[in-house]
């Protein structure tokens, strides 16, 4: 899953933090753990890449993972991953990270560890030992970090119906966890246009609803221009309808993050929305669903 960017100030006045293109998945020779300045959290997010083989069960047209080259790392080496997590957390907590070339420009207000994020070059919940790795990372977090540091799962929600994934979600819940589930369509047709997967849209909706009935979710919705066209108004209406159905079924959504393409996408016909277009979707979501919604802009294009 891609880690999008955050604007925590009101959408129309929020600055663009110029570390946008720096979400490389490697840091100082690490293979699985990478720190990133997250505009969405306004701090450092330490990413854990559970898909070093770059395999994903979606093929999103806006994906920024470079799949034109093969990865040298195909499998998770658990001990190495946990060692990398520990050393990276120590680097952030000590502040030494801000002496590195890559992070020396980090604004002072954002020099804080916000979260450990399961993310990376594919869908993290497809990792077959997902629950075990979440538990092991939670143990490292408990040992090294304050209780306010979150454990975030950035996910396409396609595997929530699997038992071991549900166990992993429960471990997140017990460790200041937050689930950022992707939902960026209102109809099967648009879902397939954007996310390109064999998994039915209904499965994603059912999974999100079931997970949201247990704990509040964050929804990530990326909208863009496809062949020059922004999402049709009827698609955005259908998107709001799907959100309302989740709430009507007893699901809790604490925030809808509306964002757009911020980095080089998989397909060249994908372009970012203008800031005003992102703002308009945020307003629509607020008006139609009553949910909290926030805007995350693309880069100036
Ligand atoms: S879910 Fe989509 S954006 Fe995320 S890694 Fe898979 S293809 Fe890329």
Image: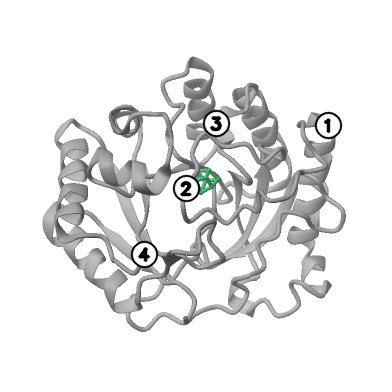
Q: Which residue is mark 2?
A: 60
Q: Earlier in the sequence, mark 4 or mark 1?
A: 1
Residue 88 visible somewhere in the drawing? yes
Which numbered mark, 2 or 3, is in the foreground of this view? 2
Mark identifier at residue 18:
none
Front-most of residues 93 and 84: 84
Mark identifier at residue 79:
1
Please rate how many residues cluster around mark 2, counting C-alpha atoms within 10 Å: few if below 14, some from 14 to 19, many from 20.
many
Q: Quadrant of the rendered structure where residue 298 is?
A: bottom left
Which numbered mark, 4 or 2, is in the foreground of this view? 4
Q: Earlier in the sequence, mark 3 or mark 1?
A: 1
Q: Quadrant of the rendered structure where residue 90 is?
A: bottom right
Determine whether the residue tagged by mark 3 lies in a helix, strand or loop: helix
Query: Residue 260: x percent and y percent?
Result: 41, 64
**What's the residue at 50%, 58% (across, down)?**
267
Cα–Cα gap, marks 2 and 1? 31 Å
Horizontal placement of 210 versus 169: left or right? left
Q: Earlier in the sequence, mark 4 or mark 3?
A: 3
Which numbered mark, 2 or 1, is in the foreground of this view? 2
Query: Residue 141: x percent and y percent?
Result: 67, 42
Q: Earlier in the sequence, mark 2 or mark 3?
A: 2
Q: Which residue is mark 3?
A: 125
Q: Which residue is mark 4?
A: 227
Horizontal placement of 169 versus 295: left or right? right
Q: Is mark 2 within 8 Å of ligand 1?
A: yes
For the view shown, which residue lies furthest in the top direction?
Answer: 163
Q: Do residues under tags 2 and 1 come within 8 Å of each other at their CB atoms?
A: no
Horizontal placement of 199 versus 278: left or right? right
Which numbered mark, 4 or 1, is in the foreground of this view? 4
Cα–Cα gap, marks 4 and 1? 45 Å
Please rate how many residues cluster around mark 4, counting C-alpha atoms within 10 Å: few if below 14, some from 14 to 19, many from 20.
few
């Amino acid at each position: 899953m891609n880690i999008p960017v955050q604007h925590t100030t009101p959408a129309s006045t929020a600055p663009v933090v110029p570390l946008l293109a720096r979400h490389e998945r490697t840091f100082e020779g690490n293979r699985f753990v990478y720190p990133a300045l997250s505009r969405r959290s306004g701090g450092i997010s330490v990413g854990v890449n559970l898909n070093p083989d770059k395999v994903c069960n979606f093929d999103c047209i806006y994906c920024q993972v470079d799949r034109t080259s093969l990865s040298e790392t195909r499998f998770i080496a658990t001990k190495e991953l946990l060692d990398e997590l520990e050393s990276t957390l120590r680097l952030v907590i000590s502040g030494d990270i801000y002496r590195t070339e890559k992070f020396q420009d980090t604004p002072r207000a954002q020099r804080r560890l916000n979260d450990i994020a399961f993310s990376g070059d594919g869908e993290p919940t497809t990792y077959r030992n997902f629950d075990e790795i979440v538990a092991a990372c939670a143990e490292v977090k408990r040992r090294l970090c304050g209780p306010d540091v979150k454990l975030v799962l950035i996910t396409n929600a396609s595997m929530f119906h699997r038992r071991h994934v549900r166990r992993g979600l429960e471990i997140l819940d017990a460790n200041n966890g937050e689930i950022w589930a992707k939902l960026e369509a209102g109809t099967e047709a648009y879902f397939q246009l954007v996310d390109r997967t064999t998994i039915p849209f209904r499965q994603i909706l059912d999974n999100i609803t079931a997970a949201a009935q247990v704990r509040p979710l964050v929804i990530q919705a990326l909208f863009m221009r496809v062949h020059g066209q922004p999402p049709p108004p009827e698609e955005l209406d259908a998107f709001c309808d799907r959100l309302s159905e989740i709430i009507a079924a007893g699901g809790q959504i604490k925030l809808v993050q509306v964002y757009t393409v911020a980095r080089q996408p998989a397909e060249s016909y994908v372009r970012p929305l203008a800031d005003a277009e992102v703002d308009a979707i945020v307003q629509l979501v607020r008006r139609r669903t009553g949910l909290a919604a926030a805007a995350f802009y693309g880069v100036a294009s």
